Amino acid sequence: MFDDPSSPLSFVAGSAILTNACAIMQNGATVRYNLAITQWRDFRASLVARDERLSQQYIDTQAALGFAETRVRLQLHGLGLLNAAVALFAATTVMGVSGAFLVQALILSAMPVNVVMLVASGIALFLLLAATITFFREGAYGRALLVLHRDLGEPVAEEIARSTGHAD
Protein backbone atom coordinates (compact mmCIF):
# COMPACT_ATOMS: atom_id res chain seq x y z
CA MET A 1 0.00 0.00 0.00
CA PHE A 2 2.84 2.41 0.77
CA ASP A 3 4.90 1.72 -2.37
CA ASP A 4 3.15 4.53 -4.24
CA PRO A 5 3.94 8.06 -2.98
CA SER A 6 0.31 9.17 -3.54
CA SER A 7 -1.16 6.36 -1.43
CA PRO A 8 -1.13 8.39 1.84
CA LEU A 9 -3.45 10.89 0.16
CA SER A 10 -5.97 8.22 -0.76
CA PHE A 11 -5.48 6.59 2.66
CA VAL A 12 -6.92 9.64 4.44
CA ALA A 13 -9.45 10.84 1.88
CA GLY A 14 -12.48 9.65 3.86
CA SER A 15 -11.64 11.48 7.06
CA ALA A 16 -10.65 14.60 5.10
CA ILE A 17 -14.00 14.61 3.29
CA LEU A 18 -15.89 14.08 6.55
CA THR A 19 -13.92 16.95 8.14
CA ASN A 20 -15.14 19.17 5.32
CA ALA A 21 -18.72 17.90 5.68
CA CYS A 22 -18.67 18.73 9.40
CA ALA A 23 -17.32 22.21 8.68
CA ILE A 24 -20.13 22.83 6.18
CA MET A 25 -22.69 21.67 8.75
CA GLN A 26 -21.08 24.03 11.28
CA ASN A 27 -21.60 26.98 8.94
CA GLY A 28 -25.31 26.24 8.56
CA ALA A 29 -25.74 25.55 12.27
CA THR A 30 -23.99 28.81 13.16
CA VAL A 31 -26.37 30.80 10.97
CA ARG A 32 -29.37 29.01 12.51
CA TYR A 33 -27.96 29.59 16.00
CA ASN A 34 -27.57 33.33 15.35
CA LEU A 35 -31.18 33.55 14.17
CA ALA A 36 -32.49 31.46 17.08
CA ILE A 37 -30.59 33.42 19.73
CA THR A 38 -31.91 36.69 18.27
CA GLN A 39 -35.45 35.30 18.39
CA TRP A 40 -34.98 34.09 21.97
CA ARG A 41 -33.61 37.49 23.05
CA ASP A 42 -36.56 39.24 21.41
CA PHE A 43 -38.94 36.92 23.26
CA ARG A 44 -37.22 37.63 26.58
CA ALA A 45 -37.19 41.39 25.94
CA SER A 46 -40.90 41.31 25.11
CA LEU A 47 -41.68 39.46 28.35
CA VAL A 48 -39.55 41.80 30.45
CA ALA A 49 -41.14 44.86 28.82
CA ARG A 50 -44.56 43.29 29.41
CA ASP A 51 -45.68 44.34 25.97
CA GLU A 52 -48.25 42.41 23.97
CA ARG A 53 -46.07 41.54 20.96
CA LEU A 54 -45.38 37.98 22.05
CA SER A 55 -48.96 37.19 23.04
CA GLN A 56 -50.17 38.65 19.75
CA GLN A 57 -47.83 36.36 17.81
CA TYR A 58 -48.13 33.13 19.80
CA ILE A 59 -51.01 31.27 21.38
CA ASP A 60 -48.96 30.18 24.41
CA THR A 61 -46.16 32.64 25.15
CA GLN A 62 -44.48 30.48 27.81
CA ALA A 63 -44.42 27.47 25.48
CA ALA A 64 -43.02 29.64 22.68
CA LEU A 65 -40.29 30.94 24.98
CA GLY A 66 -39.53 27.38 26.12
CA PHE A 67 -39.33 26.11 22.54
CA ALA A 68 -37.06 29.00 21.55
CA GLU A 69 -34.76 28.35 24.50
CA THR A 70 -34.67 24.61 23.80
CA ARG A 71 -33.75 25.34 20.18
CA VAL A 72 -30.81 27.48 21.31
CA ARG A 73 -29.64 24.80 23.75
CA LEU A 74 -29.90 22.05 21.12
CA GLN A 75 -28.01 24.14 18.60
CA LEU A 76 -25.22 24.78 21.10
CA HIS A 77 -25.08 21.07 21.88
CA GLY A 78 -25.02 20.20 18.17
CA LEU A 79 -22.27 22.73 17.50
CA GLY A 80 -20.21 21.24 20.34
CA LEU A 81 -20.64 17.77 18.85
CA LEU A 82 -19.62 19.06 15.42
CA ASN A 83 -16.56 20.80 16.87
CA ALA A 84 -15.44 17.56 18.48
CA ALA A 85 -16.12 15.61 15.27
CA VAL A 86 -14.13 18.10 13.18
CA ALA A 87 -11.22 17.88 15.61
CA LEU A 88 -11.22 14.08 15.53
CA PHE A 89 -11.61 13.83 11.76
CA ALA A 90 -8.83 16.39 11.27
CA ALA A 91 -6.60 14.51 13.73
CA THR A 92 -7.35 11.29 11.87
CA THR A 93 -6.35 12.92 8.61
CA VAL A 94 -3.08 14.19 10.08
CA MET A 95 -2.40 10.81 11.72
CA GLY A 96 -3.04 9.06 8.43
CA VAL A 97 -0.68 11.22 6.41
CA SER A 98 2.07 11.40 9.01
CA GLY A 99 1.64 7.75 9.98
CA ALA A 100 1.85 6.64 6.37
CA PHE A 101 5.08 8.53 5.87
CA LEU A 102 6.52 7.33 9.18
CA VAL A 103 5.63 3.75 8.40
CA GLN A 104 7.21 4.06 4.97
CA ALA A 105 10.32 5.92 6.14
CA LEU A 106 10.99 3.99 9.34
CA ILE A 107 9.57 0.66 8.21
CA LEU A 108 7.36 0.46 11.28
CA SER A 109 4.22 -1.56 11.62
CA ALA A 110 1.15 0.25 10.36
CA MET A 111 -1.08 -1.58 12.83
CA PRO A 112 -0.91 0.96 15.75
CA VAL A 113 -1.55 3.89 13.41
CA ASN A 114 -4.48 2.09 11.79
CA VAL A 115 -6.04 1.18 15.14
CA VAL A 116 -5.79 4.75 16.45
CA MET A 117 -7.22 6.10 13.19
CA LEU A 118 -10.05 3.58 13.27
CA VAL A 119 -10.98 4.43 16.87
CA ALA A 120 -10.75 8.21 16.28
CA SER A 121 -12.77 7.96 13.06
CA GLY A 122 -15.40 5.80 14.74
CA ILE A 123 -15.83 8.28 17.59
CA ALA A 124 -15.92 11.19 15.15
CA LEU A 125 -18.54 9.45 13.02
CA PHE A 126 -20.63 8.81 16.13
CA LEU A 127 -20.34 12.52 17.05
CA LEU A 128 -21.36 13.55 13.53
CA LEU A 129 -24.44 11.33 13.68
CA ALA A 130 -25.29 12.61 17.17
CA ALA A 131 -25.03 16.20 15.90
CA THR A 132 -27.29 15.37 12.96
CA ILE A 133 -29.92 13.88 15.30
CA THR A 134 -29.60 16.94 17.56
CA PHE A 135 -30.27 19.25 14.62
CA PHE A 136 -33.32 17.18 13.61
CA ARG A 137 -34.63 17.58 17.17
CA GLU A 138 -33.96 21.32 17.01
CA GLY A 139 -35.94 21.49 13.77
CA ALA A 140 -38.87 19.82 15.51
CA TYR A 141 -38.90 22.63 18.07
CA GLY A 142 -38.87 25.16 15.23
CA ARG A 143 -41.91 23.44 13.74
CA ALA A 144 -43.57 23.48 17.17
CA LEU A 145 -43.07 27.26 17.26
CA LEU A 146 -44.86 27.49 13.92
CA VAL A 147 -47.80 25.56 15.33
CA LEU A 148 -48.03 28.05 18.20
CA HIS A 149 -47.80 31.04 15.86
CA ARG A 150 -50.92 33.09 15.29
CA ASP A 151 -51.86 34.13 11.78
CA LEU A 152 -54.69 36.63 11.88
CA GLY A 153 -55.94 35.06 15.07
CA GLU A 154 -55.64 31.44 13.90
CA PRO A 155 -52.87 28.93 14.60
CA VAL A 156 -50.82 27.98 11.57
CA ALA A 157 -51.68 24.29 12.06
CA GLU A 158 -55.40 24.99 11.51
CA GLU A 159 -54.60 27.16 8.51
CA ILE A 160 -52.50 24.41 6.95
CA ALA A 161 -55.15 21.77 7.68
CA ARG A 162 -57.83 23.92 6.05
CA SER A 163 -55.72 24.73 2.98
CA THR A 164 -54.80 21.07 2.42
CA GLY A 165 -58.36 19.83 2.88
CA HIS A 166 -57.72 18.07 6.18
CA ALA A 167 -59.84 20.36 8.33
CA ASP A 168 -62.11 18.81 10.96
Image (cartoon, rainbow, N blue to C red):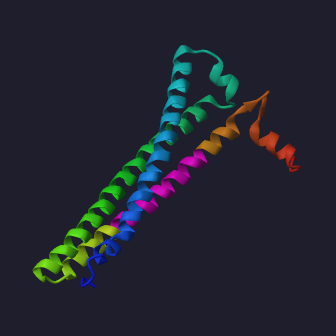
Residue 74 appearing in the image: no
Residue pictured at 79% horizontal, 28% vertical: 153
Given residues 166 and 87, the one toward you in this image is 87
* Looking at the image, residue 20 lies above or below residue 160: below
Given residues 41 and 120, the one toward you in this image is 120
x%, y% of residue 107?
Answer: 12, 83
x%, y% of residue 148?
Answer: 68, 36
* Looking at the image, residue 141 lies above or below residue 121: above
Q: Which residues are magenta?
A: 123-141
Residue pictured at 82% horizontal, 46% vertical: 161
Residue 137 included in the magenta stretch of the image: yes
Given residues 103 and 60, the one toward you in this image is 103
x%, y% of residue 33?
Answer: 48, 39
Residue 109 included in the magenta stretch of the image: no
Residue pictured at 45% horizontal, 58% vertical: 21
Q: Quadrant of residue 127?
A: bottom left
x%, y% of residue 118?
Answer: 30, 74
User: On the picture, is 43 further left or further right than 110?
Assistant: right
Q: Residue furthest left?
A: 106
